[in-house]
Image (cartoon, rainbow, N blue to C red):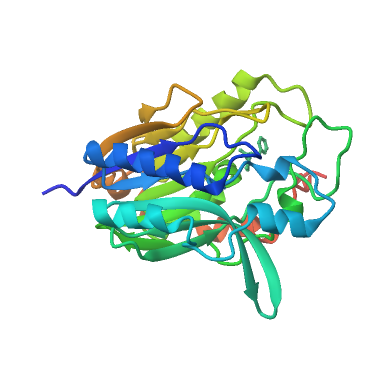
């Protein structure tokens, strides 16, 4: 008997600076209702789903950032209705948000995602490890990418949880550019990797063709799913947020590396697929049988070296 899980990516279109959390939660609830109507049982929402992608802005007053964009409790009164709906529908979900917490006697800020069970309980938490961008103000740039300013590197590592008869792992956005992240999860048995993203259409560092950025997103998702023999759901928040465009292309990718569903708009859009969680069995038994084929004794450099150092054998 195959294990099936009807999954969905619930993509969000633009969330503007002026948009209230209530208005965003209502949009998330509408997507959840759509998912329920289609018989979906697990939904992945985007990264920082409750607010505009605020790392694109420099704010002089850190208190303003904390008050406008971070969540001190989850669920909160404004997000509780989403949890209640999911519980009523019996749907599990992944939700990305900016987390502010008092930990070890100081205020900590993370780019966070949680897994919430169909019973409405928070089963797992992940804090983004790979923070892209910069910490200093770039006044000449068309926009900022201040994740290194507003967030700390995640302190929870890469972990998996059993939920809805699947072993699930969580990542966030830039993590999808680092193979180490997927390997860390699938070495723990992950068979469904979930990832929300907010990816600018333009590259703030140099004039990279926007189509090339989407191409990179598509090839990474297919490659990471296949090379780790895992299902992969990647959900965008996208569209023009106060004029700053981010691309969509939310995806559901099978362990074969095949894209089985992709969004076609930069708006609120639901894509879904009834996933066979045992589809990867042959791959895990043969081609990507880690225990049979991996040679960690030759991977030491992956741990010992951070940046590239040119060290040819012949000097
Ligand atoms: N966004 C982007 C991402 O990794 C980025 C940042 C884009 C970095 C393109 C490098 C190149 O998709 C987030 N939020 O990580």
Q: Give the residue displayed 32% in from the left and 62% down from the top.
A: 162
* Left or right position of 299 against 228: right
* Left or right position of 291 against 78: left
* Left or right position of 222 against 198: left
Rendering coords of residue 282 (x, y %): 25, 44
Which of the 4 quarters of the picture holds residue 10? Answer: top left
Quadrant location, ligand no. 1 = top right
Q: Give the residue displayed 51% in from the left and 31% down from the top.
A: 13
Q: Give the residue displayed 37% in from the left and 39% down from the top.
A: 30
Which of the 4 quarters of the picture holds residue 271? Answer: top left
Q: Is residue 12 visible?
A: yes
Quick one: 133 or 181, which is closer to the camera?
133
* Left or right position of 118 against 101: left
Quick one: 215 or 141, which is closer to the camera?
141
Q: Is residue 44 above or below residue 109?
A: above
Q: Give the residue displayed 34% in from the left and 43% down from the top.
A: 32
Exactly how many numbered labels are in the figure? 0
Quick one: 133 or 315, which is closer to the camera?
133
Rendering coords of residue 227 (x, y %): 43, 41
Q: Is residue 149 above or below residue 11?
A: below
Residue located farthest toward the bottom when viewing the structure as drawn: 105
Rendering coords of residue 297 (x, y %): 54, 61
Rendering coords of residue 55 (x, y %): 71, 45
**Rendered-image quadrant of the C terminus:** top right
Residue located farthest toward the right when viewing the structure as drawn: 140
Q: Is residue 229 visible?
A: no
């Amino acid at each position: 008997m195959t294990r099936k899980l009807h999954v969905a990516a619930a993509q969000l279109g633009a969330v503007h600076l002026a948009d209230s959390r209530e208005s965003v939660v209502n949009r998330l609830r509408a997507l959840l209702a759509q998912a329920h109507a289609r018989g979906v049982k697990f939904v992945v929402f985007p990264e920082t789903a409750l607010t505009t992608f605020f790392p694109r802005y420099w704010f002089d007053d850190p208190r303003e950032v904390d008050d406008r964009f971070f969540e001190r409790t989850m669920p909160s009164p404004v997000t509780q209705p989403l949890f209640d709906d999911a519980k009523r529908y019996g749907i599990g979900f992944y939700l990305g948000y900016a987390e502010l917490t008092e930990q070890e006697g100081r205020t900590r800020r993370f780019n966070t995602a949680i897994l919430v069970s169909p019973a409405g309980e928070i089963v797992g938490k992940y804090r983004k490890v790979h923070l892209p961008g910069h910490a200093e103000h770039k006044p000449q740039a068309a926009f900022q990418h201040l994740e290194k300013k507003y967030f700390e590197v995640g302190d929870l590592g890469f972990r998996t949880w059993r939920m809805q008869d699947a072993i699930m792992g969580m990542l966030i956005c830039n993590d999808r550019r680092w193979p180490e992240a997927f390997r860390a999860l699938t070495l723990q048995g992950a068979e469904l990797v979930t990832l929300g993203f907010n990816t600018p259409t333009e590259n703030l560092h140099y004039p990279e063709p926007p189509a090339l950025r989407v191409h990179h997103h598509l090839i990474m998702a297919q490659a990471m799913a296949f090379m780790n023999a895992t299902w992969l759901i990647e959900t965008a928040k996208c569209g023009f947020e106060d004029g700053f465009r981010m691309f969509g292309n939310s995806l559901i990718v099978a362990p074969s590396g095949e894209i089985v569903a992709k969004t076609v708009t930069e708006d609120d859009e639901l894509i879904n697929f009834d996933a066979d969680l045992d589809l990867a069995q042959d791959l895990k038994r043969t081609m990507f049988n880690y225990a049979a084929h991996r040679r960690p004794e030759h991977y030491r450099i992956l741990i010992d070296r951070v940046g590239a150092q040119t060290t040819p054998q012949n000097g």
